[in-house]
Amino acid sequence: MSDKFMFTRRRFLQTGLALASASSLVPAFVQRSAAASTDGADSRLSSQPGVPQDRILVVVELNGGNDGLNTVIPFGDPAYYHARPRIGIAEKDVIAWDTTQGIGLNPEMRDFKTMVDNKMAAVIQGVGYPNPNRSHFSSMDIWHTGDPLGGKGLGWIGKTLDHYRASHNGVIDPTACICIGNETPLATQGRQVKPIAFEDANLFRWAGADLHPVLEKEYQHISRVGAQGQLEVDPANQASFLMRTALDAQIASDKVRNAVSRKPVTNFPQSRLGRQLQMVAAMIRAEMPTRIYYVGMGGFDTHANQIYGHGRNLREFSNAMLSFYNELEAIGQKDRVLSLAFSEFGRRVQQNASNGTDHGTAAPVYLFGSAVKSGLLGTHPSLTNLDRGDLIYNVDFRSVYAAILENWMKIDSTKVLGRSFRIPNIIQTA
Amino acid sequence: MSRIASLQPLAASKFGFEQAAHLLNRAGFGGTRPQIEALQRMGLNRAVDYLVDYDRIDESDLPEPQCDPDIMRPPTAEERELQKQARTDEVIQDRLRAAQLFRQELDAKQMVELERWWLGRLIATPRPLQEKLTLLWHGHFASHYRAVGDSYLMLKQNQFFRTHAAGSFADLALGIVRDPAMIKFLNNNSNRKGRPNENLARELMELFTLGEGNYTEEDIKEGARALTGYTYQDNDFHFDKRAADMETKTILGQTGMWDGESFVRILLNRQDCPTFIAYKLYRHFVADIDDGFSDLAKSFITQLARLIWTMRYQLKPALKAMFRSQTFYDPAIMGNQIKSPAQLLVGTVRMLDMPVTDINLLGDAMNMMGQKLFNPPSVAGWYGGRSWINTSTLFVRQNLCTYLLTGKLPFRDGWSPDQIELDPSQFIEGLEHPTPGQIVDHLLGTFCAVKLSPERREPLVKFLADRANPTSRDALIGVMLLITAMPEYQLC
């Protein structure tokens, strides 16, 4: 009899709840919450002997398909200029990096080079996956889920946190993962664990509170019932679940707004990415128990006249990352934070007729932090041995995830990725 | 919870205001006090008939969707010629790419228009059950626009669901394998004799008819063969004889030269099918259930399944039995279902009886709450229940209501009370010199499906009691803001 009723769980739970992204208009309702722990220190990602509990991962999404070839530039290869007669970056302008290999950086990546020189940044070349998908949505889903076969299901970060929760008696801090920006990425959706997302901490509260001070007071009464600890969530009673969530939301709202209201020690650029990373730094400084932050910037889909726009984006990106790590150093948190920047694909080798580039395949990923093996890692893909005009990858992106999971977060990556990968040597802390 | 014989109808005398409100919430999206009272006066049987036999209700006032069927059309002969040339001519390649991009952007805009059209229909239709059922089938037979990439096909599918919403599930199942959007979404156009693609066959069995575990992988393989040839051309179903596998197949123990239609009929003939559909109806209209099926739920679903089976998949008898049953009105069922984003948004608009001034804003709110129309997160649809709620979506939901009540957006500092167009006195009409407690109870009766305990009710009464004039516009709007900000407001 019970068999008949077992069609519920598995398939449905695979979908998770993709908090669909706002349209690019993004008006009013862009506030999400960062729930904070209601249990204090106990529900921090708890430690096991030898397992570091204070490490943080920041994921930076470069949305649109960043043109890797004009970012990490193989200026020593004539094929590069042959393929990009009008948008190839002249050798004299390239920031020289590895002169033996003839590889350098886009002139707008000056701040990134500074980080490399300070052993705080690395590039992994030629990252991709088999049977590349050149559709934004599909390829981004693939990077988000760690599943090249279609990207349906849960996110790799979500699954990581689900796994963590399962191995800690079903307990995990509600703020384990915070996304900043107006999207809640698929990467962070877990089966049980959901991310917290918000764009601007000031939006992070009930709008009715602004209308009348008295309303705020009564709203707090309504929402914080159970603050005395009587809130048991009854699986059969939806009201108890809602009241618990409401309480989490209020506490989160308080903690996040408190944290991000503090001015940074250093100067942060007020660019899109700069503002997001400023908030992340503030929350780290406030010792929020969050372990994964997700931020991002768009504008990388450079189909036409790309030189100026792409350069501007790269400048924003590298400047924001340098500022972020400068702030972390100033507040004494630099060594705790590893950052990964990725894009959903690179772009074609040959430029198009509009002085831009079209969707491609393999591209570099960027790592930041004192724990990374800094420098130019991996091998540059061949510019002549191509897959229908596109670079052939030589590092599977999932092995990069595996390295981060195993070596930085101390989590069994096979549980998240579904199989084991040879771990590339990109993180030096054991 | 009392043990009741599940489909046993509620005694007519027990159908009071609360029950009528509950019925309107679940078989519709809720409504104003006069609307609830009208249902109450009809009595249980007539009220249910009124909601379920909705074809009797005139809906000709509702606007037709504006849709160009040809944005994503197949290439013309001239375009095909250009594509050939593009292989060696970079400039033509560029031009074609630009044209493609342009068409895609145009189609994406049209899809947004259609989203707004459907949301407008959810809000305005005099046949709310028709739209609730359309939403159910949209999530059950889920395709999403991102993968289909053709707004006209999505609309066609939507109209198909609407036409058969309270008709026969058999018609829905037989029709969905011929639906161009679904064929495209599940790649059945690539499913050819000798080169099978199992996607449609698998989801048909797992998600659309039988549920997981009630068939084997071999059945899927054979089912895929039966579906070969089922493809589409431009905007219509097309049977491609050359692609079709005409040999014999064995599916679920039945051998024959099955095609797509006969494959579906085999599935409809399995007892697992009515059970699965009954479960879906239960989850959509009665209770959010997960793994822990109570005995009551199991019993109810079993009986509902039997009814669906006996009535050869006609849905109306099952719907009526469900909406008349004692179980449906059980206190543990009433007020214990988490509102979907559609339910929250549409329900609040209907309860406030307000004209909608910015459908785009409401559409964006739907997205942020996780229910982007025409875009379920995967072929398994929306899971619903608690998955709608987390600390992120809760603020969105609360602030949506703040906006609907006052016109204030969260980030808009420069806001003035003059922006409030709503006249809240309509909600306490008929009350003579009410006390704060009476006002609160009256409002809760219309707006809140959960019976609040005295402690939960207290802040509301206190707020009004502290006001100089508890029936002033400010006071009433204030207390309604508090009501919609309550966690319990997320339930129906």
Image (tube, coloured by chain):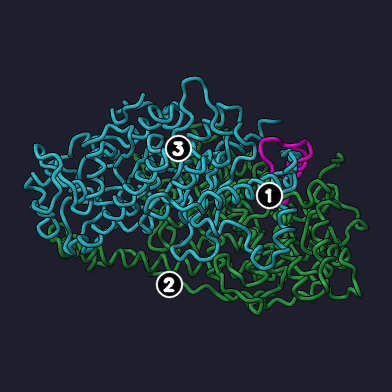
Chain colours: A cyan, B green
Instruction: Please name the residue that numbered disc 3 is placed on.
Output: B248
Labels 3, 2: one chain: yes
Mark 2 surroundings within 10 Å by alpha-carbon count, few (fewer than 14), some (14 through 19), many (20 or more): few
Residue segment shown in magenta: B282-307
Amino acid type at mark 2: Asp
Kind of residue indicated by mark 3 = Thr
- The main secondary structure of the magenta stretch is helix
Please tell me which of labels 3 and 1 falls first in the chain. 3
Residue picked out by circle 1: B281
| Camera-side residue of B238 and B328 | B328
Q: With A378 as the anchor, is B490 left or right in this view? A: right
Residue occupied by mark 2: B68
Residue sitting at x 43%, y 40% = B198
Position in image of residue B442 (x %, y %)? 85, 65
Judge left or right: residue B474 versus residue A6.
right
State the SS at label 2. loop
Q: Quadrant of residue B82?
A: bottom left
